[in-house]
Amino acid sequence: MSGGEALRVAVVQTAPRLGERAANLADMAARARAAAADLTVFPELATCGYAFGARDAVADLAERPGGSPGLDALQALAEELRGALVAGLPLAEGGRLYNAAALLRPGAEPVFYRKLHLFYREPELFDAGDAPPRVHEFRGLRLGLMICFDWIFPELARHLALAGADLIAQPANLVLTLCQDAMVTRAVENRVWTLTANRVGEERFPDGETLRFTGGSQVVDPCGRRVLALPVGEPAAGTADVDPAAARDKMVTARNHVLDDRRPALYRSLVAEDR
Amino acid sequence: MSGGEALRVAVVQTAPRLGERAANLADMAARARAAAADLTVFPELATCGYAFGARDAVADLAERPGGSPGLDALQALAEELRGALVAGLPLAEGGRLYNAAALLRPGAEPVFYRKLHLFYREPELFDAGDAPPRVHEFRGLRLGLMICFDWIFPELARHLALAGADLIAQPANLVLTLCQDAMVTRAVENRVWTLTANRVGEERFPDGETLRFTGGSQVVDPCGRRVLALPVGEPAAGTADVDPAAARDKMVTARNHVLDDRRPALYRSLVAEDR
């Protein structure tokens, strides 16, 4: 059990302003500097806001893997803080537009997770990702990403745990209020840390529909204890200490291993393509 | 959406006495008569208790598919009440001994689920089941069974939902306290009803190890609302009205179907036999 050292992690709960990338990035940087953590997680689409009425409007603010204003700023922030950052942002790549989460680490190229399960009106704006998320490493911590509505599909967190994740970082723009408790279950059933960085505030689509985001960002340990919970209604940030070793002990009892006790031969209906 | 009529369901929380099948069955029958429900769910190993020190001791009290004292009594009770019963019991079959749940319906043969994920010391006593659970019908309700520790494996509830279950009945002998909240997540992620009938009391294995069971039996609706919660420390029973149609509406939003939005081609790691 070589878990490495404990890391200080931060979840940052912001109220991004629609379309105002520079202001949003400045707010993110200020809060990350104040948190001074090894790993800082921001909400979904934290750079640009959520309630775009058309794909073109998001595309104008999309980041590009080779370099673009938001990514460059976040990479510089990761170098400055000598820490990792996870941030939700729109990603333009190969003629497609993704609702993505970027992982930025000092001295490394950014890597991305492209949201697999799009919520509500998101298919009007984004293409769904087409690959299961991978696990990345930072200072001995094995880190997986999911985004917001992915929470309702237990398959995704399970995939990340099977791929070796110690911690799942979840940028979110939640409008439902069921996710926070479900992420406790995701932690328990996989014995991993879960970090949810949700946003607050309200946004209005051009057609008038209004979304109110629910805050309540949190950190849950591999035994299901909520070790950090931010308030519901306002921007905030908080930190917690994360020990990777706690997520590598998969024993629920002295005789039950939460991954090895699975019966994969009996779960084949979960991967049937038609039903 | 032909969901059939609403059913009255009961969860019955007992304190079985180890080895005293006749007394346990009498207590179960009295509580089921008082509840007068369409479907009544009892705890795991409700007929016989839990803390057996050896396989032979359980085998003496095991029921047999062709007929045995406990099964015969429960079938007679189902006929008398004109309702379905789900009860945990030991099942001897084909030279094996299972921790099983029986579904008894008036005018029908009993059917069984054999626990797939054995907890803690249970492998000393039982063989693990070797088939995924099936969905059964009663008065328009499609019903799936799981037992206790199965809760920590999201694959099982998902399998039942994909097989068409409206409701998951879970006989339990819980000693951990994480399950009740996780069953809310199971309800939400599958949009099914979940019924947990847990036991109370304390039992001591012959080697002195003592287990305390945690009660808190419950009924959760497909939106994750706990519509019934029994006390933690004492025998009890409660009823709720279950509308199968509520579990057939799988839309989390106007555009998100909790089963159809899955990406099964990307979940293949969940069925890999080695990892």
Image (spheres, coloured by chain):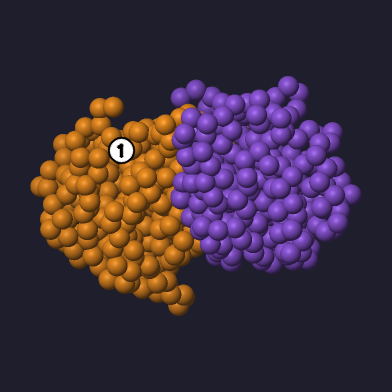
Chain colours: A orange, B purple
State the residue position of label 1. Answer: A246
Chain containing the residue with disc 1: A
Residue A174 image position (x, y, % from top left): 40, 62
Residue B6 vs residue A106: left or right?
right
Looking at the image, how many numbered discs can be counted on the residues? Answer: 1
Residue A101 image position (x, y, % from top left): 33, 49
Q: Residue at x 17, y 49 (%)?
A: A37
Please state which of residues B219 and A3 is positioned toward the viewer in this rendering. Answer: B219
Q: Is residue B19 above or below residue B79?
A: above
**Residue that extends furthest to the bottom in the rendered view of this protein:** A208
Dot 1 amino acid type: Ala
Please state which of residues A153 and A59 is positioned toward the viewer in this rendering. Answer: A153
Q: Residue at x 69, y 35 (%)?
A: B90
Locate the C terminus of chain A and report the quarter of the image it occupies.
top right
Please state which of residues A203 and A212 is positioned toward the viewer in this rendering. Answer: A212
Residue A153 vs residue B93: left or right?
left
Residue A162 vs residue B155: left or right?
left
Asked where in the image residue A269 lies, by quadrant, the reply is top right
Q: Residue at x 59, y 26 (%)?
A: B54
Residue A166 image position (x, y, % from top left): 33, 38
Q: Residue at x 36, y 73 (%)?
A: A202
**Residue that extends furthest to the right in the rendered view of this protein:** B107
Residue B265 in view here: no
Give SS at disc 1: helix
Q: Is residue B219 above or below residue A1?
A: below
Locate the N terminus of chain A and report the quarter of the image it occupies.
top left
